[in-house]
Amino acid sequence: MSTPSSSSSTECRTTLVTPRRVNLQLQATTQADAILETATLLAGHHAMTSFEKFQEDLLSREAAGPTHLGTCVALPHARTAAVMEILVAAGRSEQGIPFTGLKEPVRLIFVVATPRSAITGYLATVGALARMLRDTNRLERLLHCATPAEFAALLPAV
Amino acid sequence: MSATLVPTPDENDESAAPLATAASRAGDSRQARLRLLLRIRVWLAERIRFSDLQVNLIFAGVVGLMGGFASVAFRIAARWFTGALTLHWPVTEETLAELPDWYRLLVPVLGALAAGFCLWWGSRVGRSGTSTDYMEAITLGDGVLPFRYSLVKSLSALCTIASGGSIGREGPVVALSAMLASLFGRRMHWPTPRLRMLVACGAAAGLAAVQNAPIAGAFFVAEIILGQIVMESFGPLVFASVVATQTVRNFLGESPVYDIPAFRLNSNFEMVPYIGLGLLLGLVGAYYLQLLRVSEKIFARSGIPIWARLAIGGAVVGALGLLSPAVYGNGFAAINALFHQQMLWRGVLLILVVKLLATAATFGSGAVGGVFTPTMFVGAFLGYFVGIALRWLAPGMQFDPLAFALVGMGAFLAAATQAPLMSILVLFELTRDYLIILPLMLACVVSYYVCRGAAGGASIYSESLKRKAAREGQSEPDWSRTLVGDLMRLNPPAVTTDAGFKKIAESFITTRFNYLYVTDQKQHFEGAISLHDVKPYLSDAALADIIIARDVLRDDFPRVGPHDTLRKALATFTHHDGERLPVISDDGEGAIGAGSGLPGDEGDEEGEASGRLLGSISKTDLILAISAAGSKTPAQENPAAANASHLPESGQVK
């Protein structure tokens, strides 16, 4: 069985996060607010048909089960009818945000929005993010980089 | 890869480090096993695409095994019973013929009395509302054959056959095998179409086992009982027949039932007399059917108890046996003798007449047993007689009466059963001689058409079904009114919306289906997970803890309601590549977003009701049910004939 990353990388390589979708200074202090603040980076994207609906779906999914990786990283995600293509936004909090079921505060939040029809793409994107964020070296660099451009450059294409 | 599908202990907790290491090793081992199983599962799913079709084959094999054992057991039991009745051991085909005259007269009467008592007793203590006729169970009923009364009928058949009754053992063995299949299917809680198919496999296995002829077994059921050859049912029939035959051969050897000499065709001109033979046997076949029917009517209208009727039938056989011992039994021995002894026309004619009368007496009296072998007997002797007559008329042509006997067997069987294809294959299988094929095909087809015209499409088997259909008209299922709920299987494999990836992976390993249904906590159907969608990621440890079922389900998954027609279900299947469809309650309960927790659910936008998951319907079951609707029963073909006859059930198993 081929690994998901290898199969997806040969088919279509797209930039996972652009600097415009990165916020290195999240102000929110609660789980829901931090997720929505990160999600706001996707508002106005041409592939977003209803930002309100996307927010609802994102919080609904978050309530259904944990999306954190057990470390200081969370991947709130939702398959939703409110987007037409896979979108990713990233947020970083200096002080950290308490997440349900997690001792350590979350400092990195990656919001993933996927069209309902793109199940395989959804798994590929979330899987690729989860794998790269388990790399402690890369995680350290993401936590300490200075600009959104540097941050986006640390995330390889999928 | 450090992450596992099994959550690891907290690495920061130093006191738990040794425990954590051990748990981590155990987790790694489980993860590796799960990954291996997943690889195998996905490999199989992509290459074999397992469905009910393959599963049916496996169960057909089990039924074939049971049919084979049933045949062997019945044969041994019949031999013991004959030994007990005649006080002779070992029992041979000639045992009855070697008895003193008075005892030869007495044995069939004693056996018939015992058989009659069995039927009388069985009807008092064990009779259920369900029919015991396997043909009815397959074509008209629900595939249910009662265990106790079927055994009683088989015991009755044993008494008749062991005491020399002119009837075949294929009937009770076929019925016994079908009953075992029915029992097996009911234990598995199979829906009606599949249960009926399993009973059909039992019948095929029974005949294949008795005749040592697997092709005959499969075609017997396909052509006569099902009236069609579709691979959904024919494949299992073949499988069951082959397994049954191999089982019997393991115990009784591989030699064919009949020791048949090589077939000779002296010239192409001989095809003409074979066509004539077909014409004659087709005509005689119609009278043969009438003889059996008249005999049944006479006994039925006599009003005497069943045990007395059978005793009279036994007395007739005993008396005719004094004229010619060939009347005893199913006729295997007499047919073999015909193929290896020079017989004069007077002897052949005598045996033919007494055998016809003995069969009519046994069959008409209501004895349980088959008429397949006696019919072949009559065909063989008729063919032989025609061969002798032709040789006398045209001595220069060197006609071989044995060749006419062989073709006669097939042609008469084709006429009486109205199943020419099966008859051709039976004879080909019995002779194992390709040379017989051309004259046999001609004679079988001609006799079939002649008899069909003369007897109005009736056959030795259609009579039974017609009567039962007329008497129990309500038992005939109207498949146009069958609904999805009637074929639904309960408790389909499903997970809840919050099930993690590990649970999903395990569910795909433990079931053979490629779609896993997803419900909420209240059993409301939310959609299905496709193995195709998730297979590259099922063993991806990175996704194990953050993906749940609702993330990857297809909420536009096709579905049917329990009150939908089979036609609608079939139409839904045409747009769906799966083997099953979920059956969702259509009572409005749980409709539109109830319990889905997905505000953005597309189904909600489209106003699609999301009811409770009640069960699933299989494509194979659906096709079997629709196939059954497509093959008309004899009663449906000729309702006038069905209504014309109102004979009481004799308990015959043909």
Image (cartoon, grey):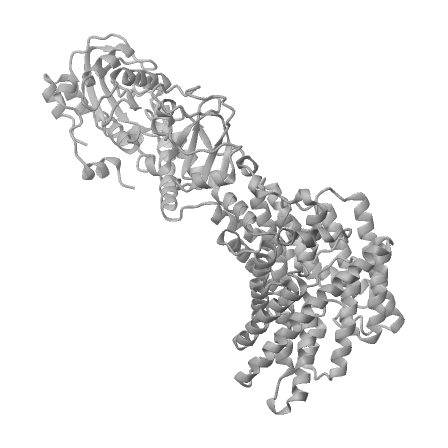
Q: Is residue B123 above or below residue B410?
A: above
**Quadrant (top left/top right/bottom left/bottom right) for the N terminus of chain B:** top left
Q: Nearer the viewer, residue B303 or B204?
A: B303
Q: Give the quarter of the image for residue B421.
A: bottom right
Q: Is residue B270 above or below residue A9?
A: below
Q: Give the quarter of the image for residue A122.
A: top left
**Quadrant (top left/top right/bottom left/bottom right) for the C terminus of chain B:** bottom right
Picture coordinates of residue B10, whole percent (x, y):
33, 20
Picture coordinates of residue A106, whole percent (x, y):
25, 15
Taking B250 as reference, is B9 left or right? Answer: left
- Kindly give the residue lying farthest to the front in the view shown: B640
Q: Nearer the viewer, residue B600 or B449?
A: B449
Taking B500 as reference, is B477 left or right? Answer: right
Picture coordinates of residue B124, whole percent (x, y):
82, 45
Q: Give the quarter of the image for residue B393.
A: bottom right
Tell me what residue is drawn at x 68 percent, y 88 percent.
B392
Q: Nearer the viewer, residue B295 or B212?
A: B295
Q: Is residue B270 above or below residue B651?
A: below
Q: Is residue A121 visible?
A: yes
Q: Is residue B160 visible?
A: no
Tell me what residue is drawn at x 38 percent, y 27 percent.
B549
Tell me what residue is drawn at x 50 percent, y 27 percent.
B586
- Kindly give the residue lying farthest to the bottom in the view shown: B396
- Kindly give the residue lying farthest to the right in the view shown: B102
Taking B275 as reference, is B559 left or right? Answer: left
- Image mark count: 0
Picture coordinates of residue B616, whole percent (x, y):
49, 35
